[in-house]
Image (cartoon, helix red, strand yellow):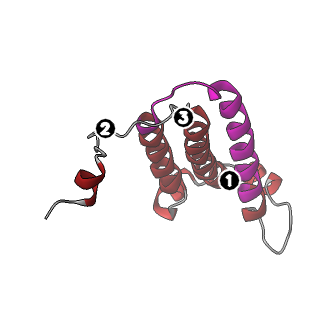
Amino acid sequence: MASNLETTGASVSPEVEHAEKPEGPVSAAILAGGVGAFALGVLTTLAEASEGFKNLLNLYDPVGPLSGKTIGAVIVWLIAWAVLHLMYRGKAIETRKALTASLILIALGVLGTFPIFFQAFAAG
């Protein structure tokens, strides 16, 4: 039995052609996510290392310094996204490299939020 493609005369190419779109904005968003996660880890570790910095991050008493850590990380993420987007728009950036860099930054950021890690820097 012949397939529908054979009977209509259509052929299927092994490589599907598509319009080339620059992946710069996608890479910028991916990298910005990693930068934001890394910023949260850094802010968490710095808050543990310095009592003054911890007090500076206390933007809302019921929440404590967590309010400043998260707001600071979101601000860093938004700024990184805007700057990276402006740098990479219209450019062909390899998304795989951006993803790899972002995953490394996320892993470091998560590490910075683990008590075993950030308590090693505790102000004594």
Question: Toward the viewer: 10 or 119?
Answer: 10
* Residue at the spot 63% in from the left edge and 50% down from the top edge: 49
* Residue at the spot 50% in from the left edge and 50% down from the top edge: 106
How far is disc 2 from disc 3 in space, using C-alphas? 19 Å
| Image quadrant where one finds the C terminus | bottom right
Q: Is residue 52 left or right of residue 32?
A: right
The disc labelled 3 sits on which kind of residue?
Answer: Glu
Q: In this view, does 9 lie to the left or right of 30?
A: left
Q: In this view, does 82 lie to the left or right of 2?
A: right
How far is disc 2 from disc 1 in space, using C-alphas? 52 Å
Question: Toward the viewer: 81 or 93?
Answer: 93
Q: Name the residue under label 3.
A: 23
Query: Does the magenta segment cover residue 40?
Result: no
Query: Does the magenta segment cover residue 94?
Result: yes
Q: Which stretch appears magenta?
A: 69-96
Secondary structure type for disc 3: loop
Residues packed near mark 1 inside 10 Å, few (<14), some (14 to 19) or many (20 plus): many
Q: Mark 2 points at which residue?
A: 15
Point out the tag, 2 or 3, that comes first from the N-terminus: 2
Estimate the x, y position of residue 17 in percent, counting from the top left. Answer: 40, 36
| Image quadrant where one finds the N terminus | bottom left
Q: In this view, does 116 lie to the left or right of 84?
A: left
Q: Name the residue under label 1.
A: 47
